[in-house]
Amino acid sequence: MQRVTFSRNFTLSLSRTCQCYCKYCAFATHQAHLHAPVDVERILDEALRRNTKELLVLTGERPEVNPVVAERLAAWGHEDFTSYVVWACERALERGMLPHTNLGVLSKEDLARLREVTASQGLMLESVDPSLMETVHAGSPTKHPLERLATIQAAGELKIPFTSGILVGIGESPDSRVESLEAIAALHAEYGHIQEIILQNFVPHPRYHGAEVAEIAEEASKARWGGEGQVGAEVPLPGWANPVGIEEIKCLIVECRRLMPDVGVQVPPNLSDWWPELVEAGATDLGGLSANGDHISPEEPFPSPHQVRKELAPRGYALTERLCVYPQYMDMDWMEQGVLDVIKLKYWSFIPRRGSGRRSEESIDAGLAPRAIEKGRDGVALSEDELTALFSETRPEVIEEMRIAADELRQELAGDLVTFVVNRNINFTNICVVGCAFCGFGQGRRSPDAYEVAEPDFAARISEAVEFGATEICMQGGIHPDLTLEEYGRWLRLAKETAPQLHLHAYSPMEINHACERSGKEPGEVFEYLLDQGLGSTPGTAAEVLDDGVRQRISPNKLPVARWIEIIEASHRAGLRSTSTVMFGHIEEPRELARHMTVVRSLQERTGGITEFVPLSFIPFNTLLGRTHGIEEITVQENLKHTAAFRLALGRTITNLQASWVKMGLEGATEALRWGVNDLGGTLMEENISRMAGSQHGVRLDPEDLIAAARAAGRTPAQRTTLYEILETYPAAGV
């Protein structure tokens, strides 16, 4: 799964008055146009109601050249137009929106004034071809390439996160398009401030004869989002323009990726029907799918995020929301403190990961992690501060110490065996009423993707598992509102009737809680009943992060920590063993992971009922949490660091640490065998939860795959049961 980003924005065309006379522009007017302060406040309130994060401020170039505009500005207490824009941006920040301004060519002084109140700024270079000054740019002095490049350079000198791009099809030559990209790339190479390049194909517009483009754009958006498709009549191409096709834009995408591999490539999804193919060609961003339309091309409505997702999903792409400022610029070097404070307060999960799911700003003693590593290697329980230090650690040499200690502890507890189980997952329904933001699996009853497995199909899957050599069936489902305790028992009985020899590893604490609520029974009574129906052990899933603050943020309807503990303890008292899990790499802080590990270790010290600990890294692609918080998938290196920290956190309390090849890929799981892992999990045969979240690592492995992975790490593979009884070892050939 690959990601394509967009910004949820709202456009404020503060003034359309412009000193330029570009022949292709339908936005600009030479009449006096300026929104009054009361109108600005109203527009901002509307933007807030629509849950937008970015305020896109568009204007003509130097509108104060019009004496009426200048007079109005003075009456409202502003010495120039930039002052008024600053005021509007301040009002947006007060409401928690991040301003992105595009005011045309500006002096370095004006850029600096705007920097204090904007998250990012932009200016289209359009073209470096000076001959256009005699055609489409005639009478537009600030469209000269040198003027525009000077503004882009000044933004770099001021360390302003910046968006630029080219306009394709206005009479420029193919060579000049590449030269334009090269000019931007040269400035980016010097200053590093270009966050994205827009490749905008020219589309001819009608003239609006004094109509308000914002109103036209709003109506066009309503029509498009209402399912009416494209609106407006087609306008013929002017004589000075040149037609642009998809192959030309594809070539420019390739050039962008070659010249600026670290920069986003944006294509507008409202100006052509072939934008999905441009995504497949390497475009990474669709810009702002503005809630109130495109004010530059108002008759060309944006598709809605929902429409875009439907188009991209079959192609293997996930649409993810971003802020107007790209993640790499979210720090004090690139942003003013007041703007950064808005991100930290409202959009903290968009800040790049530093150590755990999100960046923690607490100060940690540099010597704490090395001391914690030494204690963890000896199996000594670590304090919350010490665990926080491990999860926060970024120094390569200290992380290597962590790896060595975790590997030594693994050797002491589990030896050189690498175990796996031959099993099959069966998710018997994905209908769910919980609504977890991190989940791509659960569906409403009326969703077209909702399913319930029929009994004959269920029995057939059990039989297939037996033929495959499985010893375990892992059964979990969504929290279906109609499922009763007896229904849960029925699935167990059906499995046992089909294959009595199979071990049934079934029902998360969330499902057990649901069975308790439907039956009015306590967890112990529920487990007693399910044991009679054939239950063999309990998955310790639904744990996510065992901190109620995190749980409230990612799934407020999920059972609280105390209830999760109560249910797992009840399963242990009933004589059932359980696994335990953590889901990390989303919005949790290192300290919250530390609390999770303290809960798990304490539970194991009380009951001794946990067979294994399974770290599960968050897959963001097809989840609400990933889409709306801009969360990137955790890197393999971060995953491995966390794996070692989990081993040290558990000490000698839980022998078995598993790597999830579904989350990490088999290559990553194999490497994890050097980071404290001794188990590679199961063959699965089918896996829907990670797959529907966007995992790219498949749903089935053969035993031979896991055997080869263990041998690649220099270890001895062994097939086990669910409860870690060794069934067969596989020494290397000739041993």
Image (cartoon, rainbow, N blue to C red):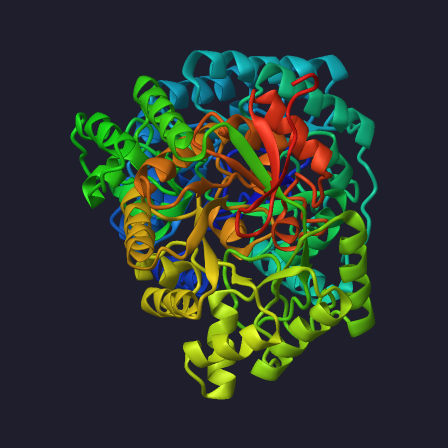
Instruction: Give the quarter of the image for residue 278.
Output: top right
Image quadrant in which the N terminus is located: top right
Q: In the image, is residue 270 above or below residue 457?
A: above
Q: Position of residue 57 (x, y in %)?
A: 45, 45
Image quadrant in which the C terminus is located: top right
Q: In the image, is residue 490 above or below residue 676?
A: below
Question: Which one is in front, 88 or 326?
Answer: 326
Question: Which one is in front, 592 or 518?
Answer: 518
Q: In the image, is residue 317 above or below residue 328?
A: below
Does any portion of residue 197 appear in the rendered image? no
Which residue: 51% across, 15% down? 146
Q: Is residue 160 left or right of residue 10?
A: left
Which residue: 37% across, 25% down? 408
Which residue: 60% across, 54% down? 293
Q: Position of residue 208 (x, y in %)?
A: 66, 52
Q: How many marks?
A: 0
Instruction: Give the quarter of the image for residue 343.
Output: top left
Q: In the image, is residue 219 above or below residue 480?
A: above
Question: Which one is in front, 584 or 575?
Answer: 575
Does any portion of residue 175 appear in the rendered image? yes
Which residue: 36% across, 55% down? 608
Q: Residue furthest front?
A: 735
Q: Position of residue 301 (x, y in %)?
A: 68, 54
Q: Is residue 317 left or right of residue 456?
A: left
